[in-house]
Image (cartoon, rainbow, N blue to C red):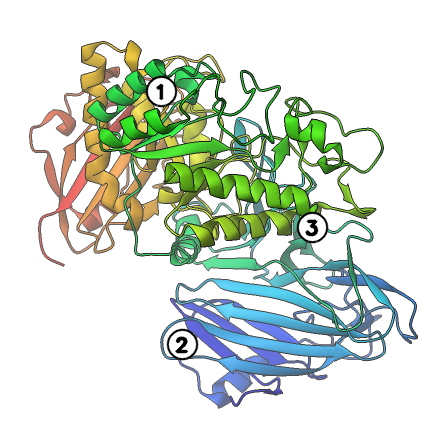
């Protein structure tokens, strides 16, 4: 199609997905089909398909054919939630509700790479111009973003500029996620009935209860079966994600930024660009749906796929007990067990002897570190490890020099400060001086100590957030992005982790600017089995930090053996958060074996395909990583409760090449876990060789496993592809 034309039929195809756009009778762009690849259809076949999808005119309804366009429009009979809302102050607009028409399309559909369509429409009466950026990536992921420009005099007070995508009517079941601190990403499933199921995040950050994805699918869909559609709102501030089914037959998934009244105002010629909404379809369950999202997030990395360093973090080892000899002794043992990166967590800066003081004063505490951090950094580097540092740049304690000298830099909407959370407040990043101070402090720290890695925390919600009399979450989020961008631009090799009291800021937009997320403050492996599984719907494994903690979990008090703790972290960005100086030689030897096992698996963590073989017993949780060429795979088989039967049901292994045979072997690094019977093939030397097709269809027998134990299975192809 030539550039900048009126909208015609556009058929985009990538990675088994078709996105078919066509104009309705008034030239408004409509998604005719988003889902399975329709094949190479010529113009006549496409026209026939579009005609075959044309609806009729029911009784007691509008006297014209009504189709819901990419901008669902109440002036054109749409009865659901409008995506464009706002009002004008001043000027002489003749209409109040926007209804863009006169749509044009600019199409780019190269033979390789991503395809895109820029759709532009306008409502001259209301004074709105609307752009829709629509992309279909090479991985089959749909990306859509809505932008609004004020084209008339007066101020346009924007209430919403959301984005919605239609999905198949056969998707009658919804899956979304909720949660809280230390129990993030808990799934909830329910029928998709008529009405709106809407998940709003009003935390000023993504939130521990953020759904990540809103998934609609055919009844009973799982990780490896069923047709599913999903959307994700890529935004780190207040946001909404929703599913809507109308009596007229519309089935929509949508999302966008959640704006407070007056938060975004547009003068004539000014433009608001909404967040990207990511849409993923699969005809074979949740895993292929996630693979499209994983491919997109991996494509945002600044360089080729790397193998994430094994991390030792000091938090649950020393907490605020910082002393050079204490921390260097920890570094010595960390290096000995195979750690690549040593991270000094909270407690290193001025006045930070507890979590009640010091935030905002980003200089080294000379009482604890009289020579700065140089002796520690030199020691760590002398052991062959990288050095990382914890920071929380967006926060401030009232008990800090910065707050005492500049009390106006605390973000607030009233004379009184907002409610305290962990004895801290929010630093107003829209204050130019506050922004400059924290930026310059970060740059100085990174430069002085050649920091390789920042653990960037954010330990409270934003409440009563106002800047210059305007709701401030939108501006604060934009300022946070700018701060990340400036720090990364000054130090391109610096890696940054997004932590927000654990998993409070996990979304595709923050992942476009960081190198991994900390999915939860709990490293209790039982909790992690669940939350890592569901976080991986969006986040690929190498971007998800997972650490081996001590025998008794800091956040829950549960006790687990080393094998369970280490196996739970094995297939992710692996780390240790444990006082290694207190371990005996036998435990250190076992931990060293687990670190070595992870390093064997690590190439697949960065490049492999993550799978979750469905098992009929909910007590059995299986996670696998399959090589790109399917030459090998690693599976962690875990129990999260007592199995329903004495002998667990056979395990069907997904992801393998059906036309190759695989040698199976038990690679569990230590035998400290309780299994009642290993007299099956698991104990048989070199294991068994089984055809990939048989492994997927018939499966393998599992040993009898006690609750909260884990085994590691390695599958290696025995024949060429």
307 with respect to 691 (left or right): right
Indicate whether 296 appears above or below 642: below
664 with respect to 603 (left or right): left
Q: Nearer the viewer, mark 3 or mark 2?
A: 3
245 with respect to 95 (left or right): left
Q: Earlier in the sequence, mark 1 or mark 2?
A: 2
Q: Are marks 3 and 2 in contact (CB under 8 Å)?
A: no
Image x and y of residue 654, in percent: 29, 46
Q: Are marks 1 and 3 in contact (CB under 8 Å)?
A: no
Q: Nearer the viewer, residue 95 or 317?
A: 317
Disc 3 secondary structure class: helix
Give the Cα distance between marks 1 and 3: 43 Å
Picture mark count: 3
* Quarter of the image where one finds residue 385: top left
Q: Mark 1 = which residue?
A: 708
Question: Which residue corresponds to the image point at 74% horizontal and 32% vertical from the top-left?
Answer: 407
- Mark number for residue 474? 3
Question: Which residue corresponds to the image point at 18% horizontal and 18% vertical from the top-left?
Answer: 589
């Amino acid at each position: 199609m030539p550039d900048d034309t009126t909208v015609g039929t556009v058929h985009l195809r990538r990675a088994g997905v078709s996105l078919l756009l066509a104009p309705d009778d008034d030239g408004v762009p409509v998604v005719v089909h988003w889902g399975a690849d329709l094949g190479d259809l010529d113009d006549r076949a496409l026209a026939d398909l579009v005609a075959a999808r044309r609806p009729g005119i029911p009784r007691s309804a509008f006297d014209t054919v009504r189709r819901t366009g990419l901008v669902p429009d109440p002036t054109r009979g749409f009865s659901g939630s409008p995506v464009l809302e706002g009002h004008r102050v001043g000027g002489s607009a003749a209409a109040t509700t926007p209804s863009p028409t006169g749509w044009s399309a600019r199409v780019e559909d190269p033979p390789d790479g991503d395809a895109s369509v820029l759709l532009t429409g306008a409502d001259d009466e209301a004074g709105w111009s609307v752009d829709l950026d629509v992309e279909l990536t090479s991985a089959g992921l749909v990306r859509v973003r809505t932008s609004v420009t004020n084209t008339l005099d007066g101020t346009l007070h924007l209430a919403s500029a959301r984005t919605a995508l239609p999905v198949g009517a056969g998707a009658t079941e919804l899956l979304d996620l909720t949660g809280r601190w230390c129990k993030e990403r808990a799934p909830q499933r329910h029928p998709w009935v008529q009405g709106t199921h809407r998940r709003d995040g009003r935390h000023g950050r993504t939130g521990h209860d953020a759904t990540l994805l809103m998934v609609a699918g055919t009844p009973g869909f799982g990780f490896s079966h069923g047709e599913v559609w999903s959307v994700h709102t890529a935004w780190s501030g207040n946001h909404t994600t929703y599913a809507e089914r109308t009596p007229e037959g519309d089935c929509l998934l949508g999302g966008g930024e959640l704006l407070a009244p007056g938060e975004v105002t547009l003068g004539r010629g000014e433009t608001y660009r909404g967040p990207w909404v990511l849409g993923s379809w699969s005809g074979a369950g949740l895993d292929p749906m996630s693979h499209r999202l994983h491919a997109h997030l991996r494509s945002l990395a600044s360089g080729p796929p790397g193998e994430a360093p094994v991390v030792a973090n000091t938090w649950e080892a020393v907490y605020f007990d910082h002393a050079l000899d204490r921390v260097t002794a920890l570094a010595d043992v960390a290096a000995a067990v195979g750690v690549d990166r040593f991270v000094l967590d909270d407690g290193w800066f001025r006045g930070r002897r507890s979590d009640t003081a010091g935030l905002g004063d980003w200089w080294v505490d000379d009482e604890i570190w009289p020579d700065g951090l140089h002796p520690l950094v030199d020691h760590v580097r002398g052991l062959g490890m990288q050095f990382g540092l914890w920071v929380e740049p967006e926060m401030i304690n009232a008990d800090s020099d910065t707050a005492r000298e500049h009390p106006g830099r605390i973000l607030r909407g009233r004379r009184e400060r907002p409610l305290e959370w962990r004895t801290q407040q929010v630093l107003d990043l829209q204050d130019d001086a506050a922004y400059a101070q924290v930026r310059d402090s970060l740059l100085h720290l990174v430069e002085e100590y050649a920091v390789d890695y920042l653990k960037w925390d954010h330990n409270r919600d934003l409440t009563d957030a106002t800047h210059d009399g305007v709701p401030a979450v939108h501006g604060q989020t934009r300022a946070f992005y700018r701060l990340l961008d400036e720090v990364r631009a000054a130090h391109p090799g610096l890696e940054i982790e997004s932590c927000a009291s654990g998993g409070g800021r996990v979304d595709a937009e923050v992942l476009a600017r960081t190198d991994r997320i900390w999915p939860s403050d709990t490293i209790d492996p039982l909790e992690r089995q669940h939350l890592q599984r569901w976080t991986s719907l969006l986040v690929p494994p190498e971007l998800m930090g997972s650490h081996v903690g001590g025998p008794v979990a800091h956040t829950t008090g549960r006790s687990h053996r080393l094998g369970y703790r280490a196996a739970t972290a094995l297939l992710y960005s692996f780390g240790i958060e444990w006082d290694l100086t207190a371990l005996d030689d036998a435990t250190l030897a076992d931990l060293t074996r687990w670190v070595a096992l992870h390093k064997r698996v690590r190439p697949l963590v960065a490049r492999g395909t993550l799978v979750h073989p469905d098992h009929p017993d909910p007590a059995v949780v299986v996670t696998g990583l399959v090589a790109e060429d399917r030459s090998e795979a690693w599976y962690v088989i875990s129990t999260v409760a007592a199995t329903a039967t004495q002998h667990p049901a056979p395990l069907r292994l997904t992801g393998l090449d059906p036309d190759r045979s695989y040698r199976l072997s038990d690679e569990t690094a230590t035998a400290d876990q309780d299994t009642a019977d290993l007299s099956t093939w698991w104990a048989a030397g070199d294991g068994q060789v089984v055809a990939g097709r048989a492994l997927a269809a018939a499966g393998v027998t599992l040993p009898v496993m006690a609750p909260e134990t884990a085994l590691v299975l390695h599958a290696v192809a025995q024949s060429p592809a």
